[in-house]
């Protein structure tokens, strides 16, 4: 780690000013398109970057014998005192309406909270009720709509 003294001043639009000597010593790789700086110089490896312990592979734990068995074989195996039963179930967590509404509230600006029911998934799947103002538009075969 390296401690750098910074002096507080008005820098207009700059966050900080780094000396050329510091840049030579650390020789960072600057990728302007990714907006990133990589410190990989020998000086940085020796003085600045953290040292991680080398990971050595550990011995592999003994493998368990796992079988997929039929219902009849399961009934026999479960009676054996040396058998272990492990059940794994995968499922999607079902969200209740309150949880969904809380999630929807986070996504919608407060001024639209009076209309939250319009954003519910349940309401979106239902067509509106037929009313007396329903009408059809008579289309003319092969007619082209006017521009504008």
Image (spheres, rainbow, N blue to C red):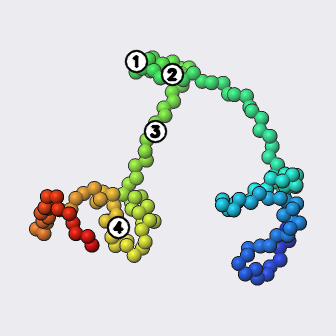
CA gap, disc 1 and disc 4 = 53 Å
Secondary structure at numbered mark 2 = loop
Indicate the position of residue 14 as horizontal and vertical percent values: 73, 75
CA gap, disc 3 and disc 1 = 24 Å
Q: Residues within 10 Å of mark 4 (few under 14, many from 20)?
A: few
Label 2–label 1 contact, CB within 8 A? no
Q: Which of marks 3 and 4 precedes in the sequence?
A: 3
Q: Which of marks 4 and 2 precedes in the sequence?
A: 2
Left of 62 or right of it: where is 2? right
Q: Which of marks 4 and 1 precedes in the sequence?
A: 1
Residue named by callout 3: 90
Residue named by callout 4: 116
Q: Quadrant of the N terminus?
A: bottom right
Tell me which corner region of the image, top left, top right, bottom left or bottom right, holds residue 34.
bottom right
Residue named by callout 1: 72
How many marks overall? 4
Choose mark 2 or mark 1, whichever is in front. 2
Residue named by callout 2: 67
Q: How crowded is mark 2: few (under 14 residues within 10 Å), some or many (20 or more)?
A: few
């Amino acid at each position: 780690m390296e401690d750098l003294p910074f002096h507080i001043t008005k820098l207009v639009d700059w966050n900080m000013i780094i000396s050329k000597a510091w840049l030579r010593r650390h020789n960072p790789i600057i990728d302007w398109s990714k907006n990133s700086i990589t410190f990989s110089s020998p000086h940085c490896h020796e003085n600045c970057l953290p040292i991680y312990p080398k990971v050595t592979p550990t011995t592999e734990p003994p493998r368990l014998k796992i079988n997929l068995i039929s219902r009849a074989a399961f009934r026999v195996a479960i009676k054996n005192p040396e058998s272990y039963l492990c059940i794994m179930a995968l499922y999607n967590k079902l969200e209740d309406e309150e949880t969904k509404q809380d999630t929807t509230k986070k996504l919608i600006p407060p001024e639209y909270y009076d209309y939250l029911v319009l954003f519910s998934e349940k309401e979106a799947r239902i067509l509106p009720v037929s009313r007396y103002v329903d009408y059809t538009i008579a289309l003319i075969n092969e007619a082209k709509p006017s521009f504008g």
